């Protein structure tokens, strides 16, 4: 039972990163406005796209293979990423006077994903 749960959580987290990465690459304004209530300007636009490429690569690297086991390294990578993003965005939300309406839901989403991945590190 834990095995099916593990594959589902890792697959869902990986696909979420792939989708968000593609959006950051193709439409960085959308996510920057939703998260930070600001459009990326100057160096911000290529940096947002760089983040998108990183998310896309992370998601692809962490997609479960056709073999039945979930690779612990992929789970660890997704866990570290989601925990780090939750902490970083919570810090931004707590310290910034202006942020987008999607910032706190995204913090919660990444925290929930990190918590869901945590027990899989023991597998």
Image (cartoon, helix red, strand yellow):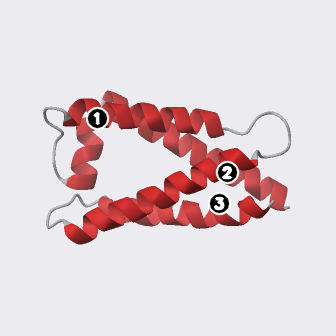
Determine the image quadrant of residue 112.
bottom right
Query: Which SS class for mark 2?
Result: helix
Name the side, left or right, on which 91 lies relative to 42.
right
Left or right, 54 with respect to 114, comes to left
Q: Which residue is mark 2?
A: 75
Depth check, mark 3 against mark 1: the one in front is: 1
In terms of secondary structure, where does tag 3 sit?
helix
**Cα distance between the residues tagged 2 and 1:** 26 Å
> How many neighbours does mark 1 have within 10 angstroms: few (below 14), some (14-19), or many (20 or more)?
some
Give the residue displayed 27% in from the left and 62% down from the top: 92
Instruction: Name above or below for residue 31 compared with residue 107.
Output: above
Name the residue tied to disc 3: 117
Tell me which label, 3 or 1, sits earlier in the chain: 1
Q: Quadrant of residue 9?
A: bottom right
Distance from Cα at disc 2 to Cα at disc 3: 7 Å
Label 1 secondary element: helix
Circle 2 packing at 10 Å, graded few (<14), some (14-19), many (20+), is: many
Which residue does the image show at 18% across and 39% down from the upper left?
A: 40
On the image, the x and y values in percent for residue 65 come to 76, 34
- Give the x, y percent position of residue 3: 83, 55
Whether label 2 touches label 3, CB < 8 Å? yes
Q: Is residue 80 left or right of residue 88?
A: right
At 34% from the left and 66% from the top, the residue drawn is 90
Tag 1 residue: 47
> Residue visible at 75% across and 55% down?
6
Q: Furthest residue to the bottom? A: 94
Q: Is residue 63 above or below residue 103?
A: above
């Amino acid at each position: 039972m834990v095995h099916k749960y593990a594959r589902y959580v890792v697959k869902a987290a990986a696909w979420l990163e792939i989708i968000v990465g593609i959006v950051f690459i193709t439409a960085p304004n959308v996510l920057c406005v939703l998260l930070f209530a600001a459009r990326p300007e100057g160096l911000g636009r290529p940096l947002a796209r760089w983040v998108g490429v990183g998310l896309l690569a992370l998601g692809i690297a962490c997609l479960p293979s056709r073999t039945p086991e979930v690779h612990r390294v992929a789970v660890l990578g997704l866990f570290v990423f989601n925990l780090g993003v939750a902490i970083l965005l919570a810090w931004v939300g707590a310290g910034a006077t202006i942020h987008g309406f999607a910032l706190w839901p995204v913090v919660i989403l990444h925290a929930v994903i990190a918590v869901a991945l945590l027990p899989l590190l023991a597998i």
